[in-house]
Image: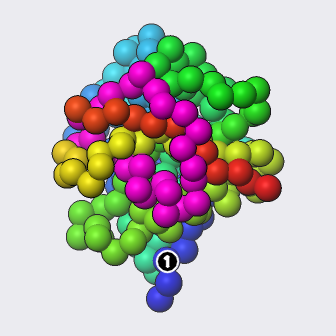
Amino acid sequence: MPLEVRPARSFADMRTMVGPKRADANVCWCLSYRVPAKQNRELSGPLRGEFVEKLCHRKVAPGVFAYDGDEVVGWAAVAPRAETSFARSTKIPHVDDLDVWSVWCIRVRPGHRKKGISHVLLDGAVDFARQQGAPAVEGYPVDNGGSKVDLTMAYVGTKALFEKAGFSQASETASVLAGFPRVLMRRSCA
């Protein structure tokens, strides 16, 4: 059965993809780039999950899930750049005044990796953004030159992944993650 990408509406699936093993744990919940730093610090323990549950019920979903049948196997965060910390970043430049969307987290569940799910998720994130009226989608992956990226930092993707999805490098950045420079990649939704 082929993978299906759908808007992230299920909080249970969100918990599976980015939630903690313990409800009181302070894991990211994919909020680090979504909310301002002060709010990110204030949201602790169960408050993080409660905030994400509200995101799942907004008019526009907080991203997309990949499903293999009924099983959620992947997640991609995608939202208007204006709603993210990238809108205020001093390290990741704005290349123009387009109201672009950003994709900043691509996660595949253990046991499902190395099957091309990241590629399906990235395409699905672009399709979702296009359906919401986005003129283009940006990502900020590492330019690792083929070197291995630590699994805990691989969520931003690699330049090669974005290139395979039809993105082009629009700019260099001053951001570094896991020892690798990050680049600004962009794909038009036209």
- The colour mode here is rainbow
- Observer able to see residue 61: no
Where does the image place residue 172, in percent across and percent down from the top left? 48, 31
Segment tinted magenta in the rendering: 151-178
Q: Is residue 93 magenta?
A: no
Residue at the top extreme of this rendering: 38
Q: Which quadrant would residue 8 be assigned to in this image?
A: bottom right
Q: Is residue 70 above or below residue 76?
A: below
Q: Is residue 81 above or below residue 59?
A: above
Q: Identify the residue position indicated by label 1 in the image.
A: 3
How would you rate the neighbour count of disc 1 (Cα within 10 Å): few for under 14, some for 14-19, many for 20 or more? some
Where does the image place residue 6, in percent across and percent down from the top left? 59, 64
Q: Is residue 73 left or right of residue 36?
A: left
Instruction: Residue at 27% x, 54% y: name it.
Output: 146
Q: Is residue 2 above or below residue 59?
A: below
Q: Tell which of 146 and 121 is nearer to you.
A: 146
- Observer able to see residue 99: yes
Give the amino acid at mark 1.
Leu
Where does the image place residue 144, in percent across and percent down from the top left? 29, 45
Residue at the bottom extreme of this rendering: 1
Instruction: Residue at 42% x, 62% y: name it.
Output: 118
Instruction: Residue at 56% x, 67% y: name it.
Output: 5
User: What kind of element bears circle 1?
Assistant: loop
Instruction: Residue at 19% x, 45% y: name it.
Output: 150
